[in-house]
Amino acid sequence: MSKQSRRREALVYHAKPTPGKIKVVPTKKYASQRDLSLAYSPGVAEPCLEIAKDIDNVYKYTTKGNLVAVISNGTAVLGLGNIGPEASKPVMEGKGLLFKIFADIDVFDIEVDTEDVETFIQTVKMIAPTFGGINLEDIKAPEAFEIERRLKAELDIPVMHDDQHGTAIISAAALLNALELAEKNIEEVQIVISGAGAAAISCSRLYQAFGAKRENMVMLDSKGVIRQDRETLTTEKAEFATHRKIDTIDEAMKGADVFIGLSTADIVSPDMLLSMADNPIVFAMANPDPEIQYDIAIATRQDIIMATGRSDHPNQVNNVLGFPFIFRGALDVRATKINEEMKMAAVKALAQLAKEPVPEQVNIAYGETRLTFGRDYIIPKPFDPRLISQVPPAVAKAAIESGVAKNPITDWDKYENELLERSGSDNKIVRLLLNRAKLNPKRVVYAEADHLDVLKAAQIAHDEGIAMPILLGRRSVIEKLKAEIEFDADVPIIDPKSDEEEARLKSYAKVYWEQRKRKGVTLYSAEKIMRERNYFAAMMVNIGDADALISGFSRSYPSVVKPMLELIGLAPGSTRVATTNLLMTQRGPLFLSDTAININPSATDLTKIAQMTAGVVKMFGMEPVMAMISYSNFGSSKNQTATKVGEAVAYLHKRHPNLLVDGELQADFALNSEMLQDTFPFSKLAGKKVNTLIFPNLESGNITYKLLKELNQSESIGPIMMGMRKPVHILQLEASVDEIVNMTAIAVIDAQQKEKLAEAQNG
């Protein structure tokens, strides 16, 4: 190979994707000596020389353009104060994770051991060449103002102190929508701001940018109202000092339209709320305990529009709605700074998003029937998947229009597609799943709790509020394992073979005997059977002593299914039990059915399996796009194993025309939308991205699922039982702790749905 060719190859190897161009392969090869010579010596010399010629090439040949530094000195850690750089590191690492999860931005967290402003500034300036942006975090005021001001002026990359501007941006979006609902004009409203730190100052400035009048604002610190006649005011406090002759929050709140709380807990009383104007807007954002408790506030004023910093109440002012997406937009156009225009664009995008129809997956995640713009929904939810595609473009456009973008975007459709690719749906689906379970946790019996991994999963489910575990198994073993993993929660432990459970066992046995006494079961044999943990656990669910069941970790699938079918049985209207597995693949979430139950289903069985699977897909907040798989394409084989699939599809097309399903199809055509479009343009799936595969028999479904899982190391949720009367879910042998936790969430959501269905049927 010539030197010129080698040089060109090295440059291509190190080149990075640019906005609007989706990089399909996420990593470089590194298996051979040749690969390593491109990655490092001698190949790496070529991009180094290109960057030396033009420093802007660093964005082309390195990861700088997607790398943000989260930098703190630990002097103002939320709720903890000045705890120092080392103690602040967990917070900074967590912030980095949020950047990655929500906006696919890589982060280094850096903790600087100095409280000297000049030293801090010089330290950041010296390391800035490594990064595409700087997120300042948890730096106390007033030093934070000077540090941010200087770094913004002296660096040519985006710099933002999130404690100031994050809260300001999110609360401003909420305020604009609240004022619209209250039918009030921002230029006229009286605003009380409790707190005078970095966030309060930044909020006040941003509200002014949207039209609020400084003379209509009253700011308070720990000494009371900040008045113009007070001595020794900082520059920032003097900016918002009032001329009014008032001293206390009680006086300030009289007739006020808006209260902004960025201070401390329980400083606002019901009487203060009652003294405010009609339709008061109260943002009590002190965390974890707000300036007035949500329940007290809404009980005091029916006309109140309330927001807090908490996730367990409506209208959470959460900075994660802002900083990942603001930096995403800024990085993608290589903005030299984050200016007021960009922040205001983020505010407007967030405010507008709250007014648009909410995707069903968001409703599902937050346990809502239908989220709509109104007093309890003035700001988007953090798990709203539209944030990534709406906020960064707004920020990027503002950067371009205000003249701070070095790499303007011209094809906005391509850019939006790139953002959606970045968002990835696998982890998001798991988060949504767990979040939904937490809204209404149920009693889940773990039939094999004397196995360490099962017990660990039960501990996680308990600690994270996903479920209320009931531990089934040998008491002595469970207690020993609990001690080993420091699982000290007081949760029920039940040993079916112990003397203390004899009365319960006999009562369960009698119920079982009554059900099956005409099928050769004696009362004696029923008592013997009930000592088997899966029968005992199934009966717990059957009679209502537990809401859901998890088993199968240490026993074969058929041996666990049998007691479930005997005791629980089919759901009303179901004629078939089946399972589906969800795999998190590189192309996105993929459901596969049936993977565990039906050996050779008929055409009728396949229609039932498809319908039940569609229901599960919808449970995850997704629209099912289903391919019925075969070795044949649309009648190319007349063998019964292929024609039964075609018969099932014909039935579904006739009886369920709105269901997006087609086949029979070979797997490559089902998964390659372009190939399907070119060859079979008549298909209902042409041009669609299939997310569900229905297999013609158990052999093909189970083999495919396990091959995909092992070869791609894909995260799995399942097998999810479908068609059962009660929520029972059976694990794969030796399932991982994460898989058991995910299945626990599925069991809880299944119980939630069955509970709602029963309530609807009962009136």
Image (cartoon, rainbow, N blue to C red):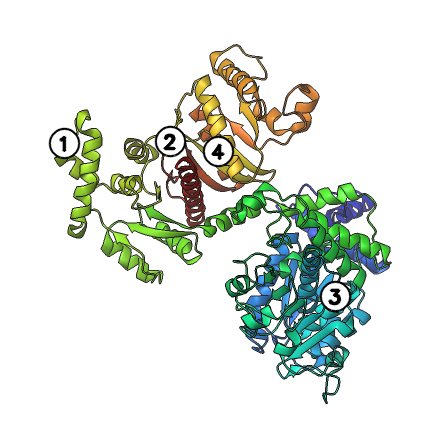
Residue type for callout 4? Tyr
Residue type for callout 1? Thr
Q: Earlier in the sequence, mark 1 or mark 4?
A: 1
Give the label on residue 207, or none.
Answer: 3
Graded by Cα atoms within 10 Å as few (under 14), some (14 to 19) or many (20 or more), the crowding at tag 2 reads some
The local secondary structure at tag 1 comes to: loop
Q: Residue at x 26, y 49 (%)?
A: 473
User: Residue at the bottom extreme?
Assistant: 231
Give the label on residue 705, or none.
Answer: 4
Q: CA distance from mark 1 to mark 3?
A: 76 Å
The local secondary structure at tag 3 comes to: helix
Q: Circle 2 sits on which residue?
A: 571
Residue depth check, mark 1 versus mark 3: number of the one nearer the observer: 3
Q: Quadrant of residue 674?
A: top right
Using the image as rendered, state which of residue 543 and residue 72 is in the foreground: 543
In which quadrant is the N terminus drawn? top right
Q: Position of residue 12 (x, y in %)?
A: 76, 46
The local secondary structure at tag 2 comes to: loop
Using the image as rendered, state which of residue 511 and residue 747 is in the foreground: 511
Q: Quadrant of residue 601?
A: top left
The local secondary structure at tag 4 comes to: helix
In which quadrant is the C terminus drawn? top left
Using the image as rendered, state which of residue 123 and residue 655 is in the foreground: 655
Q: Earlier in the sequence, mark 3 or mark 4?
A: 3
Q: Earlier in the sequence, mark 1 or mark 3?
A: 3
Q: Circle 1 sits on which residue?
A: 522
Q: Is 31 placed left or right of 536 in the picture?
A: right
Q: CA distance from mark 2 to mark 3?
A: 55 Å
